[in-house]
Amino acid sequence: TCAFAGQKKVLAAYEEAVKCGYSGARAGRLHTPHGVFDTPMFMPVGTQATVKAVSPRELKEMGAQIILSNTYHLYLRPGTELVAEAGGLHRFMDWDGGILTDSGGFQVFSLGPLRKITEEGAAFRSHIDGSTQFLSPEIAIKAQMNLGADIIMAFDECIPYPAEYQYAKLSTERTTRWAERSQKAHTRSGQALFAIVQGGMYQDLRRVSANDLVSLDFPGYGIGGLSVGEPKPVMYEMLEQTVPLLPENKPRYLMGVGTPDCLVEAVRYGIDMFDCVFPTRVARNGTAMTKSGRLVVKNAAYAKDFLPIDENCGCYACQNFSRAYIRHLLKADEIFGLRLTTIHNLYFLLDFTKKMRQAILEDRFLSFREEFLAQYCK
Ligand SMILES: CNc1nc2cc3nc(NC)[nH]c3cc2c(=O)[nH]1
Ligand SMILES: [Zn+2]
């Protein structure tokens, strides 16, 4: 059955175009001040106000719609007030598409040597100069208002994996209180604030977290605390528990995911938005993503392979260069080499989400998923 449910309300409004088949997969459109964007979507990560090794023009060319930047990094360097003085993040990095900033929650817990978490917020040492820093919902929201992203995230704690039930419970309850404080601190119109569902790997805590945040009525919901080392079946189980509790007419954003097999599974559960450093990170050590799995183009096997990374790929790297040439550049430590693998990997994931959208619109997503998983080896 295909139903159309549209809503053109506040910014970052989610307009579901088509929900088809017997899965939760849906194709939608996300309304923001910088445009209306198609979902499912992959968002390239530009941690320090640049997607490493590629230009905004190249990102536009390959079909990027919304890109991500990290508040934690920009808060420490160059400072979010400075970015505000520069006219905001869009002007600063010359990107006129959508921008989503995460709130520092994850980085504080995964990057800076953590000092202490209290009800007030998180004290940590800067990974840049070792200085003692502090982030709270109010500080994180003010920083994101300064950056001026179209979508910003509530300040939360990404619960480490594994975590005791009691810790996960207390942390999740605090994250919900932090979400409320984030909401109160968010006074910038034309900017959507998403909450982040936590709950560790506990079904009941996931449900409580989702229900509590839905009752606080946000324009969109991140699903956090996943892709933190848990087995994939556990991640999917948490999605199964969480996504159905989230409003159909609001976007769902699975944070930090991921590889194509995870994307196609998460879309089946009804996820609309993804971000992941994987494509850009593995590109920098010479690994290309293909529909059959990873291709380490740096390997000697490709020294005389004059075919492109993927003959059916429409990206700049595959249209113009061979595996042998890219391998040569990588071996010679030439910057252009990792630019080409990065361009290919970003294009691959952006194109993959476009193909999933098309499959949903044509009501053939489940067979698309079967065919893809049959060919892709992790
Ligand atoms: C900004 N808050 C926030 N970011 C996250 C980023 C993540 N990135 C991954 N895997 C790479 N898991 C994540 C979880 C969170 C999370 O629970 N919260
Ligand atoms: Zn390519």
Image (tube, rainbow, N blue to C red):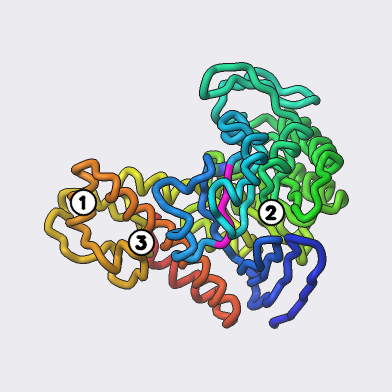
Callouts 2 and 1 close, C-beta under 8 Å: no
Kindly tell me whether residue 266 is visible in this rendering.
yes
Question: Looking at the image, is mark 2 or mark 1 earlier in the sequence?
Answer: 2
Q: Where is the N terminus found, in terms of image quarters?
A: bottom right
Callouts 1 and 3 close, C-beta under 8 Å: no
SS assignment at label 3: strand
- The three-letter code of the residue at mark 1 reads Arg
In the picture, the disc for residue 121 is: none
Q: How crowded is mark 3: few (under 14 residues within 10 Å), some or many (20 or more)?
A: some
Note whether ligand 1 is within 8 Å of mark 2: no
Q: Where is the C terminus found, in terms of image quarters?
A: bottom left
The answer to whether 86 is drawn above or below residue 36 in the figure is above
What's the magenta region?
Answer: 65-69
Task: Tell us which disc is closer to us: 2 or 3.
Answer: 2
Q: Where is residue 375 in the image (x, y as percent from the top left)?
A: 38, 67
Please give the residue where the numbered disc 2 appears in the rendered image. Answer: 150
Q: Residues within 10 Å of mark 1 (few under 14, many from 20)?
A: many
Side (left or right) of 51 relative to 211: left
Note whether ligand 2 is within 8 Å of mark 3: no
Please give the residue where the numbered disc 3 appears in the rendered image. Answer: 290
- The three-letter code of the residue at mark 2 reads Asp
Q: Does the magenta stretch include residue 346?
A: no
Dominant SS in magenta: strand
Instruction: Looking at the picture, tell me which residue is in the foreground, 166 or 108.
Output: 108
Instruction: Looking at the picture, tell me which residue is in the foreground, 60 or 329.
Output: 60
Residue 321: quarter of image: bottom left
Quarter of the displayed picture in which ligand 2 can be seen: bottom left
How many circles with numbers are drawn on the protein? 3
Q: Residues within 10 Å of mark 2 (few under 14, many from 20)?
A: many
- The three-letter code of the residue at mark 3 reads Thr
| Residue name at image x 69 percent, y 82 percent | 2
Please give the residue where the numbered disc 1 appears in the rendered image. Answer: 327
